[in-house]
Image: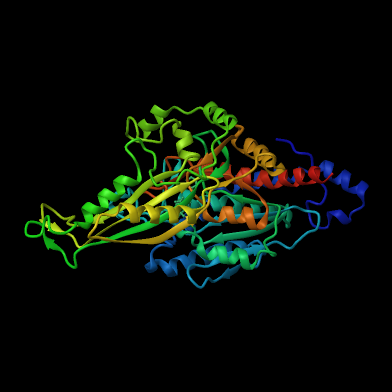
Amino acid sequence: MVTPPEKNYINGFATIQRKTTEVRESLMEPVIDQVTKFLHSNRTNAEQTLAEFLAIPSVSADPKHRADVRRAAEWVAEFLSQMGLRAEIVPSDTGHPVVYAETPYREGFPTVLIYGHYDVQPAEDPTLWESPPFQPTVRGDAIYARGASDDKGQVLTHLLSVRAWYEVTKSWPVNFKFIIEGEEEVGSSALETFVDKYRDRLTCDCVVVSDGNQFGPGQPAITYGLRGIAYFELRLTGPNRDLHSGSFGGTVTNPATALTMILGRIMGQDGRITIPGFYDDVLPLSDEERRRLRELPFDERAFWATLGVESALGEPGYTVLERRWARPTFEVCGLWGGYQGEGAKTVIPAEAGAKISFRLVPHQAPERVRQQLLAYLAQICPPGVRIELVDLHASPAVVTPLDSPYIKAAEMAVKAAFSAPPVFTREGGSIPIVGLFQERLGADILLLGWGQDDDNTHAPNEKFSLTDFHRGTLASAYLWEFIRKVAKSHET
Ligand code: BES
Ligand code: ZN
């Protein structure tokens, strides 16, 4: 790809007389080509760097890994400092630190905030992993490790591309601000405080986030929507101790049985959520968007086949993609109560519980959903058990406008790197801070996921394709070039 050279790529160039500059530039290889060559010849090094990052077990949910999470923050800060930036590790009162850095501000250049997370989900049962979760292992085209796709591998694509620009030009193509946080997988609560506190300092033209997926192998995507979430733990307590289910069965309410009754009433047999008022605020899909989603090459049966099922219960009247990206859902994420061991034990447990989540869509406020759930629980809870609802996560859904010049830049960058134009998709997952960036910073959001649906994020054997890792890095390098261009043409 040939891109005409621009002024001011290299420090000091602007001071050279214009005529001379033009002559020199015409003889010089365009900077973007130098950057992409640099990236190409440093691929092995990039993979080693990724493996080093992945070897740190930065599990934010587990207090045992507190020091490891800190080590991952230091690793990111060190990486940034290698390109002459002073990265700050900003502690939080409640959780894990935020790594923040910015390039020296240059007037007339757009400002891009790069966001990502260095924390990872718990690896859980090590016997389910083919290679240990924190010993990154390459098999075929992919690197296997917890956090490979979500999100260390994706974050690193941007760090590497910025570093490549810096190595080639000893400067930065745009103004950068970096927020790489350590609490995304546990809800980003500390980051909210951080954004509020440093709001003025975080001013930017656009926010770039790579923490999601492409539409399919070889089919890159620009994501313009994320679902929100309202996540709770539901605790039920009954008798003051476990009881013999023969001696006491029929005399008290069994909390485990009550739990199944309650859960069974949150969603109907038809897949619709039955909490009164739950759908009131849901922003309906427009006919135009439904048409666009239907045009995406997606085969529901083939999709189910990849997941080992033949069909599914879901909200009637909507396609699988609509249900997945743009309709709210209810999921039981965990469930306990009573005897779980070998064989049978006749017991009425004193308590039972569940982790339940609602994925939310635009205009649904997590707090309103909480209130509606509380009112409904009060109504359907059988006598003889007490209910406690513990808040775990709350974040609203996000939809970003597609007419932004930065989306245009991203489209060109992705196309250049992946040799295929991106399709426009939404995502079912949540990135809690993105809505806040949009609201408080008023910046355009670019969600550019380099992962794949079968990356096993949050599951055993998480992986990230090395081809996608390198293509993502390349797309990131192009992105800065194109952002500069669109920002300029936008001004004039
Ligand atoms: N990377 C995911 C979000 C995501 C998932 C984007 C799938 C696109 C497709 C992110 O790290 C994540 O897992 N977020 C959590 C947020 C929760 C802990 C509040 C999620 O969606 O469950
Ligand atoms: Zn995640």
Q: Residue at x 39, y 47 (%)?
A: 275
Q: Quadrant of the C terminus?
A: top right
- Specify whether 112 is left or right of 288: right
Q: Say whether residue 167 is visible.
A: no
Q: Position of residue 16 (x, y in %)?
A: 89, 54
Q: Residue at x 57, y 53 (%)?
A: 434
For the residue pair 202 and 127, the one nearer the viewer reads as: 202
Residue 34, quarter of the rendered image = top right
Q: Residue at x 83, y 48 (%)?
A: 7
Q: Position of residue 104 (x, y in %)?
A: 73, 63
Q: Position of residue 239 (x, y in %)?
A: 19, 64
- Specify whether 30 is left or right of 97: right
Residue 139, quarter of the rendered image = top left
Give the image's coloring scheme: rainbow
Q: Say whether residue 399 is visible.
A: yes
Residue furthest out toward the left: 247
Residue 425, quarter of the rendered image = top right
Q: How many marks?
A: 0
- Specify whether 93 is left or right of 1: left
470 shown above or below 288: below
Q: Quadrant of the N terminus?
A: top right
For the residue pair 137 and 224, the one nearer the viewer reads as: 224
Q: Position of residue 126 (x, y in %)?
A: 30, 54
For the residue pair 21 and 64, the one nearer the viewer reads as: 64
